[in-house]
């Protein structure tokens, strides 16, 4: 019979050795599973090697995820499913030959119900796989985003003049939008290049309060001589 689909359980996959392999090895295994299923389990070691390469195939065989039987490869969980489908196909054929008998009709209905249940289970498994793949993709994207944020924060920290409470600053930096992270870095020199460190706000304060939007404050000598007063004028008297 034609093997149009096979069961793929996310829980079995995550519990198995294959989940601990690299994405390259996992992808190669999925490809071989599909080809193995289409060929109804008739796939030689040579054919598999041509599909995914000798190194990846060898790794899958060393870990017994794929087994070898003579010149053929064997994938146990697919062999079991094909055996079940073959038995189901045989039962359907027998039920067809007994189409005129009530017992045969009952068996046919039972087989049909079983097939529908199997199909429904397969659809659910496929939905679970799609959901799990989406979760994995989101996790990968989050890791990449976190990695990029860490790189940008180290750039920020390297040029920020007042280096106190790095952990608090890192948390505050991670909360910013991408464009605000860049603004926070770009405006450091404009605001504090000529400012003594003691007047520079803590990094976490600078980030939490969006201080990169501040105007640069020019610090001048408050006791400088006014332009309209000579150097020999009397100093101010304070009571």
Image: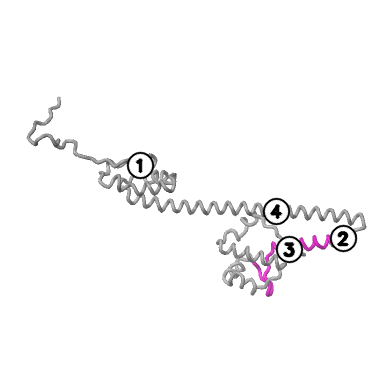
Of all residues, the one furthest to the top in this rendering is 239
Residue 218 picture quarter: top left
For marks 2 and 3, the one nearer the N-term is 3
What is the secondary structure assignment of the residue under circle 3? loop
Do tag 1 and tag 4 residues touch (Cβ < 8 Å)? no
Q: How many marks?
A: 4
Task: Choose between 204 and 100: the one closer to the eye.
Answer: 100
Left or right of residue 206, residue 29 in this image = right
Q: CA distance from mark 4 to mark 3?
A: 15 Å
Instruction: Tell me where the magenta segment starts and ends, as one range.
Output: 66-92
Q: CA distance from mark 2 to mark 1?
A: 80 Å
The residue under label 1 is: 213
Horizontal and vertical percent position of residue 12: 65, 56
What is the secondary structure assignment of the residue under circle 4? helix
Q: Nearer the viewer, mark 1 or mark 4?
A: 1
- The quadrant in which the N terminus is found is bottom right
Of all residues, the one furthest to the left in this rendering is 232
For marks 2 and 1, the one nearer the N-term is 2
Residue 232 part of the magenta segment: no
The residue under label 2 is: 96
For marks 4 and 3, the one nearer the N-term is 3
The residue under label 3 is: 3
Horizontal and vertical percent position of residue 140: 52, 54
Q: Residue at x 92, y 57 (%)?
A: 101
Q: CA distance from mark 2 to mark 3?
A: 20 Å
């Amino acid at each position: 019979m034609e093997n149009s689909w096979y069961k793929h359980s996310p829980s079995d996959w995550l519990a198995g050795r294959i989940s601990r392999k690299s994405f390259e090895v996992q992808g190669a295994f999925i490809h071989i599973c599909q080809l193995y299923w289409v060929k109804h389990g008739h796939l030689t070691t040579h054919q598999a090697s041509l599909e995914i390469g000798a190194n990846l195939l060898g790794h899958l065989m060393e870990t017994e995820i794929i087994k070898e039987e003579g010149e053929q490869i064997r994938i146990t969980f697919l062999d079991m499913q094909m055996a079940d489908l073959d038995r189901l196909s045989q039962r359907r054929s027998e039920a067809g030959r007994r189409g005129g008998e009530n017992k045969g009709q009952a068996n046919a209905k039972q087989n049909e119900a079983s097939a529908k249940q199997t199909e429904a289970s397969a659809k659910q498994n496929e939905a679970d796989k799609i959901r799990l793949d989406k979760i994995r993709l989101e996790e990968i994207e989050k890791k990449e985003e976190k990695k990029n944020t860490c790189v940008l924060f180290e750039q920020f920290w390297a040029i920020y003049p007042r280096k106190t409470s790095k952990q608090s600053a890192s948390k505050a930096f991670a909360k910013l939008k991408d464009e605000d992270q860049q603004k926070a870095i770009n405006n450091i020199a404009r605001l504090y290049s000529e400012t003594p460190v003691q007047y520079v706000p803590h990094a976490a304060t600078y980030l939490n309060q969006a201080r990169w939007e501040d105007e640069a404050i020019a610090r001048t000598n408050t006791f400088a001589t006014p332009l309209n007063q000579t150097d020999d004028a009397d100093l101010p008297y304070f009571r």
